[in-house]
Image (cartoon, rainbow, N blue to C red):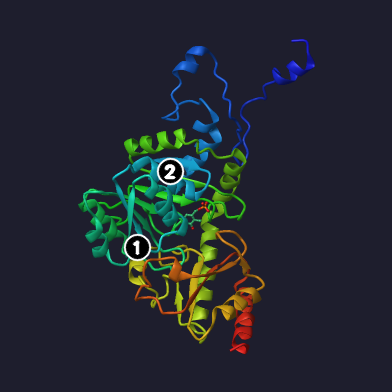
Amino acid sequence: MTDLTTTLIHHPYVPPTGFAAPQPGVFKASTVIFPNVAAMRGFEWKDKSAYTYGLHGTPTTYTLEERLCTLEGGLQCLLLPSGLAAIACVALSLLKAGDEVLIPDNAYGPSRALAEGELKAWGITHQFYDPMQPQDLAARISAKTRMVWLEAAGSVTLEFPDLCELVRVCQARGVLTALDNTWGAGLAFAAFDLNPGRSPALAVDISIHALTKYPSGGGDVLMGSVITRNPALHTKLKLTHMRLGFGVGANDVEAVLRALPSLMLRYQAHDQAARALACWCQGRSEFAQVLHPALTESPGHTHWRSLCRSEAGGAAGLFSVIFPARYGQDQIDAFCDALNLFKLGYSWGGPMSLVVPYDLASMRSAWPAYLEPGTLVRFSVGLEAVADLQADLEQALQKLVLTT
Ligand SMILES: *Cc1c(COP(=O)(O)O)cnc(C)c1O
């Protein structure tokens, strides 16, 4: 080769093998080079035995997938560009016109919106069930029911369902279960081993995560995963994943790979801080209710206690409060605005504490009897010092009381 441009593109240098470092190398590719035509025609990508195209996997995506399988106790994993894309991929892969999907009434909002928008338009019906009443779920299952979504805990109202019983209800009727396990992060409980040591073993069919939250840990990456333990189910999901082009960027995968080793430590720290602040809030007169599954008074606490580790690491860093009706929305908005360390923003799992006032009545079909009437505010506790966060809540509450 004579032309410098050509030489720079087809450069002969190959670095020595055997390089080792704490972090795995990052491979970025749309195009993957084949050694010959036979390989190009024959390479199989579905079982990860080779590489064919960036969308079908690289050493970087395979590495994260395998680590996430280990974390979750799963066997197969798909990566997607967001947690919501993971939810959508499951729905689009497994549901067809005429099917019905059942969704908990406390589900992640955009998951409801997907059912009410695209799924409905495509002839896939849905019903919302009360996650705290397994008999309500059982009553809604019909011959049309193809899949049931599960969430534990609800990510805004933090009630903890009897997950084992909900899964048993579905299994008895031969209905697929898909868990949005973002809150548990694969740490609070084992989605594929819900009743350890007992028989018959109990597991969900599919576990999805918004890696955007704790696995990324930075508030700077959007990614999702779909984990299974069934090769046929995985292949069905993987084909949809491929046909819909749900690729992820190698730099984002690298960010999650880098954050994964500290996931347990961070999750424990978020948990510990959130429990401390939720307890403190419980002692304040401004709140009608404090929602955190580790609080004995919180809805579903006994289910949380029987499924999750009781020590730090058995709950995420989320808790919500309900302000009684004596505080108007303006006052509650002003309370949120008065917070300095808790920033106004969606999502969670990063180092910075966040706060969101929710209009709960507009988010679910019915106001559950286990929630006090009032206005809900959710806190996502970051990694700041608990004393500083408590002082921040206290000064904002002081301003709230002054306006009453
Ligand atoms: C954030 C979140 C999602 C969606 O994740 P994105 O990456 O933001 O799309 C899904 N489920 C739950 C419970 C979440 O908190």
Q: Quadrant of residue 373?
A: bottom left
Q: What residue type is labelled 1?
A: Leu
In the rendered view, tell whether residue 37 sits above or below residue 324.
above
Indicate the quadrant where residue 311 lies.
bottom left
Badge 2, how many Cα within 10 Å: few under 14, some, many 20+?
many
Give how far across and how far down residue 309 sits, in percent. 40, 63
Q: Do the residues labelled 1 and 2 touch (CB within 8 Å)?
A: no
Comes first in the chain, label 1 or label 2: 2
Residue highlighted by disc 1? 307
Q: Distance between the residues labelled 1 and 2?
A: 28 Å
Q: Is residue 193 visible?
A: no
Write the residue at 34% across / 42% down: 94
Dot in front, 1 or 2:
2
Mark 1: secondary structure? helix
Residue 134 placement (x, y as % from top left): 26, 63
Q: Residue at the spot x=58%, y=89% of the render? A: 404
Ligand 1 neighbours mark 2 (CB distance < 8 Å)? no
Identity of the amino acid at label 2? Cys
Q: Which residue is drawn at 39% across and 61% down?
A: 152
> 133 or 144, which is in the foreground?
144
Q: Is residue 153 left or right of residue 135?
A: right
Query: x, y (%) of residue 325?
Result: 48, 83
Q: Toward which corner of the image does residue 140 lie, by quadrant?
A: bottom left
Q: Is 326 drawn above or below residue 10 in the view shown? A: below
Outermost residue, top direction? 1
138 sits left or right of 33 in the view: left
Can the viewer see residue 386 in this picture? yes
User: Is disc 2 placed on a helix, strand or loop?
Assistant: helix
Q: Mark 2 points at which residue?
A: 89
Residue at 60 percent of width and 30 percent of height: 29
Front-most of residues 368 and 318: 368
